[in-house]
Amino acid sequence: MIILGSDHGGFAMKEAIKRHLEEKGYVLHDCGVLDGCEVDYPDIADEVCDRVSQASSDLGILVCGTGIGMSIAANKHAGIRAALVSDTYSARMAREHNDANVLALGGRTLGENLALEIVDAYLGSAYAGGKHQRRVDHLNRYLHKELL
């Protein structure tokens, strides 16, 4: 399942992504914003990330004006590796090398066609594992440092 979320700055882009993914047959859950009204992006990021972290097979897509706020908020969550992406190569590498489980996009910084290409590249890639697992494990160690 793909978990979607946006604030008001990313609403139009999220809706375009939702239509695009529905046409491709993906199962989606939309955490809002549902009507373009002003919301605080951390609230939406929290809901998306909570759902992604509960089901390890789920991926999330977050959109705000620049993608920066959503990516910062998402990366505060244990087990979330969010990548702010603005090109298809980075989208593929985020999945293949970093096992990114959340994609962050800028609704005001990307054109719709490029954003859809990025989403396709991200969802069309899989984590490569191997030598990259050591690095992902290293990132995960940071989660436990907070508890010390």
Image: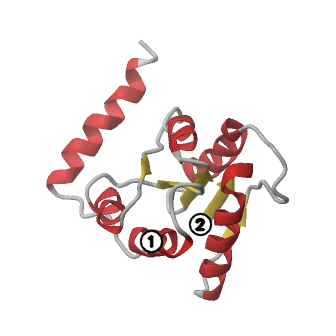
Residue name at image x 44 percent, y 75 percent: 117
Q: Mark 1 belongs to which amino acid?
A: Leu
Q: Nearer the viewer, residue 13 or 124?
A: 13
Cα–Cα gap, marks 2 and 1 = 9 Å
Return the mark for residue 123.
1
Q: Position of residue 131 (x, y in %)?
A: 14, 53
Question: Element under label 1?
Answer: helix
Percent coordinates x, y for residue 47 in the rendering:
69, 46
- Mark 2: secondary structure: strand
Assess whether mark 1 and mark 2 are in contact (beta carbons under 8 angstroms): yes
Occupied quadrant, residue 19 = bottom right
Residue 97: give x, y in percent of width and height: 25, 56
In the image, residue 138 above or below residue 91: above
- Horizontal side, residue 131 vs residue 109: left or right: left
- To which quarter of the image does residue 28 belong? bottom right
- As drawn, the label of residue 50 is none
Q: Earlier in the sequence, mark 2 or mark 1?
A: 2
Residue at 35%, 27% (x, y): give it. 142
Q: Horizontally, is 40 left or right of 144 in the view?
A: right
Instruction: Residue 99 in the image: state x and y as whole percent.
Output: 35, 55
Q: Quickly name the residue at label 2.
A: 2
Side of 75 relative to 25 (left or right): left
Q: Count neighbours of disc 2 (C-alpha within 10 A) and say few if under 14, some if 14 to 19, many if 20 or more.
A: many
* Residue in front for this viewpoint, 23 or 49: 23
Residue kind at label 2, given as amino acid type = Ile
Residue at horizontal 60 percent and vertical 50 percent from the top:
54
* Rendered-image quadrant of the N terminus: bottom right
